[in-house]
Image (tube, rainbow, N blue to C red):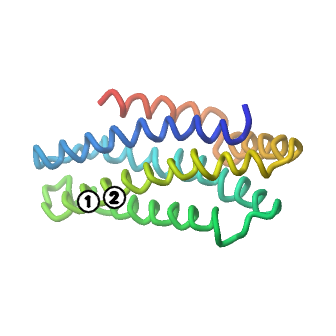
Amino acid sequence: MTPTETLKHEHKIILMVLDAIEREVISIRDTGKVNQDRLEKIVDFVRNFADRCHHAKEESQLFVKMQERGLPKEGGPIALVREHEEGRRLIKAVADAIPQAAQGDRMSKMTISENLLGYVNLLRAHIQKEDNILYPMADRFLTPADQKSLAEAFERIEAHEIGEGVHEKYHQLAHELARG
Protein backbone atom coordinates (compact mmCIF):
# COMPACT_ATOMS: atom_id res chain seq x y z
CA MET A 1 0.00 0.00 0.00
CA THR A 2 1.39 3.43 -0.91
CA PRO A 3 1.50 6.16 1.75
CA THR A 4 -1.42 7.99 0.18
CA GLU A 5 -3.44 4.76 0.06
CA THR A 6 -2.73 4.33 3.76
CA LEU A 7 -3.95 7.86 4.43
CA LYS A 8 -7.07 7.33 2.30
CA HIS A 9 -7.85 4.16 4.24
CA GLU A 10 -7.54 6.14 7.48
CA HIS A 11 -9.92 8.71 5.99
CA LYS A 12 -12.54 5.97 5.60
CA ILE A 13 -12.27 5.20 9.31
CA ILE A 14 -12.48 8.90 10.17
CA LEU A 15 -15.52 9.35 7.91
CA MET A 16 -17.25 6.49 9.69
CA VAL A 17 -16.74 8.34 12.98
CA LEU A 18 -17.90 11.63 11.44
CA ASP A 19 -21.21 9.92 10.61
CA ALA A 20 -21.43 8.75 14.23
CA ILE A 21 -20.66 12.28 15.46
CA GLU A 22 -23.42 13.67 13.30
CA ARG A 23 -25.88 11.16 14.78
CA GLU A 24 -24.70 12.16 18.27
CA VAL A 25 -25.40 15.82 17.54
CA ILE A 26 -28.91 14.93 16.35
CA SER A 27 -29.47 12.91 19.52
CA ILE A 28 -28.33 15.80 21.73
CA ARG A 29 -30.60 18.20 19.90
CA ASP A 30 -33.58 15.82 19.92
CA THR A 31 -33.32 14.64 23.53
CA GLY A 32 -31.51 17.51 25.22
CA LYS A 33 -29.24 14.93 26.85
CA VAL A 34 -25.57 14.13 26.40
CA ASN A 35 -23.92 10.76 26.65
CA GLN A 36 -20.71 11.72 28.45
CA ASP A 37 -19.03 8.36 27.88
CA ARG A 38 -19.75 8.45 24.14
CA LEU A 39 -18.59 12.07 23.83
CA GLU A 40 -15.36 11.26 25.65
CA LYS A 41 -14.78 8.33 23.26
CA ILE A 42 -15.35 10.64 20.29
CA VAL A 43 -12.85 13.17 21.66
CA ASP A 44 -10.37 10.36 22.37
CA PHE A 45 -10.71 9.01 18.81
CA VAL A 46 -10.31 12.43 17.20
CA ARG A 47 -7.36 13.46 19.33
CA ASN A 48 -5.47 10.20 19.10
CA PHE A 49 -6.38 8.58 15.79
CA ALA A 50 -7.34 11.49 13.54
CA ASP A 51 -4.85 13.97 14.95
CA ARG A 52 -1.96 12.24 16.71
CA CYS A 53 -1.73 9.41 14.19
CA HIS A 54 -3.23 10.50 10.86
CA HIS A 55 -2.52 14.24 10.86
CA ALA A 56 0.95 13.63 12.29
CA LYS A 57 1.79 11.48 9.28
CA GLU A 58 0.68 14.25 6.97
CA GLU A 59 2.26 17.18 8.82
CA SER A 60 5.59 15.67 9.81
CA GLN A 61 6.13 13.47 6.77
CA LEU A 62 3.97 13.83 3.65
CA PHE A 63 3.69 17.62 3.57
CA VAL A 64 7.41 18.03 4.30
CA LYS A 65 8.36 15.60 1.53
CA MET A 66 6.03 17.36 -0.93
CA GLN A 67 7.68 20.70 -0.13
CA GLU A 68 11.09 19.11 -0.69
CA ARG A 69 9.84 18.09 -4.14
CA GLY A 70 8.85 21.65 -5.02
CA LEU A 71 5.26 22.09 -3.89
CA PRO A 72 4.99 25.70 -2.73
CA LYS A 73 4.76 26.03 1.03
CA GLU A 74 1.85 28.47 1.02
CA GLY A 75 -0.20 26.91 -1.77
CA GLY A 76 -1.19 23.45 -0.62
CA PRO A 77 -0.28 21.64 2.55
CA ILE A 78 0.00 24.76 4.69
CA ALA A 79 -3.68 25.56 4.16
CA LEU A 80 -4.49 22.00 5.19
CA VAL A 81 -2.39 22.32 8.35
CA ARG A 82 -4.50 25.36 9.26
CA GLU A 83 -7.58 23.17 8.90
CA HIS A 84 -5.99 20.59 11.22
CA GLU A 85 -5.44 23.41 13.73
CA GLU A 86 -9.07 24.54 13.40
CA GLY A 87 -10.20 20.97 14.03
CA ARG A 88 -8.09 20.85 17.20
CA ARG A 89 -9.72 24.07 18.39
CA LEU A 90 -13.23 22.71 17.77
CA ILE A 91 -12.52 19.43 19.58
CA LYS A 92 -10.94 21.27 22.52
CA ALA A 93 -14.14 23.30 22.88
CA VAL A 94 -16.14 20.05 22.92
CA ALA A 95 -13.86 18.42 25.50
CA ASP A 96 -13.97 21.51 27.71
CA ALA A 97 -17.79 21.58 27.63
CA ILE A 98 -18.44 17.90 28.39
CA PRO A 99 -18.36 18.09 32.22
CA GLN A 100 -20.82 20.99 32.37
CA ALA A 101 -23.07 19.45 29.70
CA ALA A 102 -23.15 16.18 31.66
CA GLN A 103 -24.46 18.23 34.61
CA GLY A 104 -27.27 19.52 32.41
CA ASP A 105 -25.89 22.92 31.42
CA ARG A 106 -27.84 23.97 28.33
CA MET A 107 -25.17 26.31 26.92
CA SER A 108 -22.52 23.59 27.19
CA LYS A 109 -24.77 21.21 25.26
CA MET A 110 -25.13 23.85 22.55
CA THR A 111 -21.35 24.37 22.54
CA ILE A 112 -20.83 20.64 22.06
CA SER A 113 -23.41 20.38 19.26
CA GLU A 114 -22.15 23.42 17.37
CA ASN A 115 -18.47 22.50 17.63
CA LEU A 116 -19.05 18.86 16.72
CA LEU A 117 -21.09 19.84 13.69
CA GLY A 118 -18.40 22.38 12.73
CA TYR A 119 -15.79 19.63 13.04
CA VAL A 120 -17.81 17.23 10.88
CA ASN A 121 -18.27 19.83 8.14
CA LEU A 122 -14.62 20.92 8.29
CA LEU A 123 -13.24 17.38 8.14
CA ARG A 124 -15.52 16.17 5.36
CA ALA A 125 -14.46 19.06 3.12
CA HIS A 126 -10.84 18.61 4.22
CA ILE A 127 -10.84 14.91 3.36
CA GLN A 128 -12.34 15.65 -0.07
CA LYS A 129 -9.47 18.08 -0.81
CA GLU A 130 -6.84 15.62 0.30
CA ASP A 131 -8.29 12.55 -1.42
CA ASN A 132 -9.11 14.29 -4.70
CA ILE A 133 -6.42 16.96 -5.05
CA LEU A 134 -3.49 16.67 -2.63
CA TYR A 135 -2.90 12.91 -2.62
CA PRO A 136 -3.03 12.52 -6.42
CA MET A 137 -0.61 15.45 -6.60
CA ALA A 138 1.65 13.75 -4.05
CA ASP A 139 1.63 10.56 -6.08
CA ARG A 140 2.83 12.55 -9.12
CA PHE A 141 5.49 14.52 -7.20
CA LEU A 142 6.99 11.74 -5.08
CA THR A 143 9.65 9.38 -6.36
CA PRO A 144 9.59 5.63 -5.61
CA ALA A 145 12.31 6.27 -3.01
CA ASP A 146 10.12 8.98 -1.43
CA GLN A 147 7.19 6.56 -1.32
CA LYS A 148 9.35 3.93 0.39
CA SER A 149 10.76 6.34 2.96
CA LEU A 150 7.28 7.70 3.74
CA ALA A 151 5.88 4.19 4.21
CA GLU A 152 8.73 3.45 6.62
CA ALA A 153 8.17 6.74 8.46
CA PHE A 154 4.45 5.97 8.79
CA GLU A 155 5.33 2.59 10.30
CA ARG A 156 7.69 4.30 12.78
CA ILE A 157 4.95 6.73 13.81
CA GLU A 158 2.58 3.81 14.35
CA ALA A 159 5.08 1.76 16.35
CA HIS A 160 7.01 4.31 18.35
CA GLU A 161 4.98 7.48 18.64
CA ILE A 162 1.50 5.97 18.78
CA GLY A 163 2.39 2.54 20.14
CA GLU A 164 2.00 -1.06 19.03
CA GLY A 165 -1.64 -2.09 18.70
CA VAL A 166 -3.02 1.40 19.29
CA HIS A 167 -3.99 1.90 15.64
CA GLU A 168 -6.08 -1.28 15.79
CA LYS A 169 -7.65 -0.15 19.08
CA TYR A 170 -8.91 3.00 17.37
CA HIS A 171 -10.23 1.02 14.41
CA GLN A 172 -12.29 -0.98 16.90
CA LEU A 173 -13.44 2.20 18.64
CA ALA A 174 -14.49 3.65 15.27
CA HIS A 175 -16.63 0.58 14.60
CA GLU A 176 -18.11 0.79 18.10
CA LEU A 177 -19.03 4.45 17.59
CA ALA A 178 -20.45 3.69 14.15
CA ARG A 179 -22.72 1.00 15.59
CA GLY A 180 -24.11 3.51 18.07
Counting from the top left corner in percent of width and height, residue 14 is at 47, 41
Q: Nearer the viewer, residue 38 or 118?
A: 118
Which residue occupies 65% across, 47% down? 135
Q: Secondary structure at mark 1?
A: helix
**Most extreme residue toward the bottom, as rendered?**
74
Counting from the top left corner in percent of width and height, residue 64 is at 75, 61
Q: Disc count in the image?
A: 2
Q: Which residue is mark 1?
A: 114
Q: Which mark is residue 118?
A: 2
Q: Quadrant of residue 156?
A: top right
Locate the C terminus and report the quarter of the image it occupies. top left
Q: Nearer the viewer, residue 147 or 20?
A: 147
Q: Are marks 2 and 1 in contact (CB under 8 Å)?
A: yes
Q: Residues within 10 Å of mark 1 (few under 14, many from 20)?
A: some
Counting from the top left corner in percent of width and height, residue 141 is at 79, 52
Q: Quadrant of residue 144?
A: top right
Q: Amino acid at mark 2?
A: Gly
Which residue occupies 58% across, 35% down? 9
Q: Residues within 10 Å of mark 2 (few under 14, many from 20)?
A: some
Which residue occupies 46% across, 44% down? 45
Q: Amino acid at mark 1?
A: Glu
Counting from the top left corner in percent of width and height, residue 94 is at 33, 59
Q: Is residue 96 left or right of residue 86?
A: left
Q: Is residue 147 left or right of residue 34?
A: right
Which residue occupies 57% across, 67% down? 79
Q: Is residue 118 left or right of residue 53?
A: left
